[in-house]
Amino acid sequence: MTTHTPDVRLQFAGPVATLTLDHPTKLNCFTVDMLAQLASHLELVEARPEVRAVIVTAEGEKAFCSGADINAWGSLSPAEFARTWVRGGHRIFDRLARLSKPTIAALNGHAFGGGLELAAACDIRLITPAATIALPEASVGIVPGWSGSQRLARLVPEGMLKEMALFGRRIPADRLLACGFVAEVVQDVSAAAQEIAQKAATLSPRATEITKAMIHAGQGEDSAALIEALGSAAIAASSDRQEGVAAFQTKRKPEFPGT
């Protein structure tokens, strides 16, 4: 099944969901509508328990995503830029990062600015040999706004991050593989991503979900919410929880077994 909105396509194929940026004539740069579509698709993916892995990719051969469309934010007031564009995009990318299913970014081309931040929100990344990454925000007088200075700092060496953000340099695929930012450099990223996703689909979905949450908590990725979610999951399986609910529904005093 495919859900096709104008610029972001969502396809379900068995246990794998694929999110595809579909705006190649503008190098898949983000618009307000694309962010809204991505947010909606992420909720659909999360709500389907049969989905065991998610691939994030793009149409075209030149760019995975060239960042944010300057026409989408260039005329915004300072308040609108901060509240609507930056904070709104940040929430959506955080939603991707905290998706309960394993996520794979298949970088079919260059990933700049918001495109790089989108890739950073995924669990692992694959990239084609000719693709590069960059943070060009300073060239248009802004700063990274969708976790480029935060989440990305946990994924690449500080010097590499500064090369991009402070000196405007592009980082090639071989260096990304060497530092661990990408898992593979491969020409056919779609096929490689499918292979990895299909393998992930054979693993225990609850085990991978909880393991991902534990890893994120250790890295400070929404750790407060994750700690409470893990605690709630543990108590939900207890006899005490079952007894508490039963007692409430039958209007009696609970007798907790402690198991």
Image (cartoon, rainbow, N blue to C red):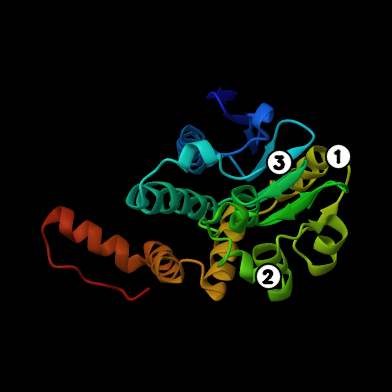
Disc number lying in front (2 or 3):
2
Image position, residue 219 (x, y; %): 57, 73
| Residue bearing mark 1 | 188
Quadrant of res 52: top right
Query: In this rendering, which labeled residue sits more in front, label 2 or label 1?
Result: 2
Q: Secondary structure at mark 1?
A: loop
First reached walking from the N terminus: tag 2 or tag 1: 2
Point out the tag, 2 or 3, that comes first from the N-terminus. 3
**Residue at the spot of label 3:** 64
Q: Position of residue 85 (x, y in %)?
A: 43, 47
Q: Nearer the viewer, residue 95 or 72?
A: 72
Which mark is on residue 111? none
Q: Give the residue displayed 52% in from the left and 42% down from the top.
A: 49
Could you give the CA–CA distance between mark 2 and mark 3, rounded to whole angstroms? 22 Å
Instruction: Read off the residue under disc 2.
Output: 162
Q: Secondary structure at mark 3?
A: strand
Question: Percent x, y for residue 90?
Answer: 47, 54
